[in-house]
């Protein structure tokens, strides 16, 4: 992948070719290291987080982790419950764009 994946199994960046059955088995059997993954991404200079899920329940936790690390971060989701489709996606893109990120169509 061209976008880094920070694993909640290891708390570190992961080469996406390692996302095999063993990885997902480990993912189910180990504690989730979500905060570690976000802190590592912040340390590596990442400041924009887009949650791609049916409902962005983790965006507040991402924002809280960034604030606890005294970092500024932009977080958004792609969909919302009862608010999907193209209008929601365009709204999310607009949120990112207003924070200085170009949208590459």
Image: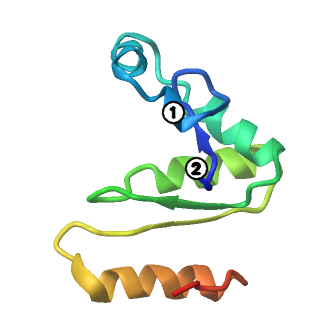
Return the residue nearer the eye: 3 or 87.
3
Residue beneath the point at 39% across and 24% down: 20
Return the residue nearer the eye: 83 or 102.
102
Camera-near label (2 vs 1) is 1
Display coloring = rainbow
Relative height, residue 92 to residue 14 (above, below): below
Residue beneath the point at 71% across and 50% down: 66
Relative height, residue 94 to residue 59 (above, below): below
Relative height, residue 98 to residue 66 (above, below): below
Residue beneath the point at 65% across and 30% down: 36
- Indicate the secondary structure of the residue bearing disc 2: helix
- Outermost residue on the left side: it is 82
Residue 70, x across and y down, in percent:
83, 50
Q: Would residue 55 be found to the left or right of residue 30 on screen? A: left
Number of other residues with Cα within 10 Å of mark 2, as a class: few under 14, some 14 to 19, many 20 or more: many
- The numbered mark, 2 or 1, whose residue comes first in the sequence reads 1
Residue 38, x across and y down, in percent:
65, 41
Return the residue nearer the eye: 3 or 56.
3
- Which dot marks residue 56? none
- Tell how many labels: 2
Mark 2 highlights which residue?
Answer: 62
Residue 58, x across and y down, in percent:
45, 49
Residue beneath the point at 62% across and 55% down: 2
Number of other residues with Cα within 10 Å of mark 1, as a class: few under 14, some 14 to 19, many 20 or more: few
Mark 1 highlights which residue?
Answer: 17
Residue 95, x across and y down, in percent:
54, 82
**The quarter of the displayed image where residue 51 is located:** bottom left
Q: CA distance from mark 2 to mark 1?
A: 25 Å
- Indicate the secondary structure of the residue bearing disc 1: helix
**The quarter of the displayed image where residue 85 is located:** bottom left
């Amino acid at each position: 992948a061209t976008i880094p994946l920070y694993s909640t199994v290891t708390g570190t960046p992961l080469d996406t070719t390692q996302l095999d059955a063993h990885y997902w088995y480990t993912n189910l059997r180990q504690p989730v290291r979500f905060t570690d993954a976000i802190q590592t991404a912040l340390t590596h200079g990442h400041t924009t987080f887009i949650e791609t899920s049916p409902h962005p329940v983790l965006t507040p936790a991402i924002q809280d982790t960034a604030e606890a690390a005294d970092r500024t971060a932009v977080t958004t989701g792609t969909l919302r419950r009862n608010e999907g489709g193209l209008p929601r996606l365009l709204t999310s893109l607009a949120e990112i764009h207003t924070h200085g990120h170009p949208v590459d169509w």
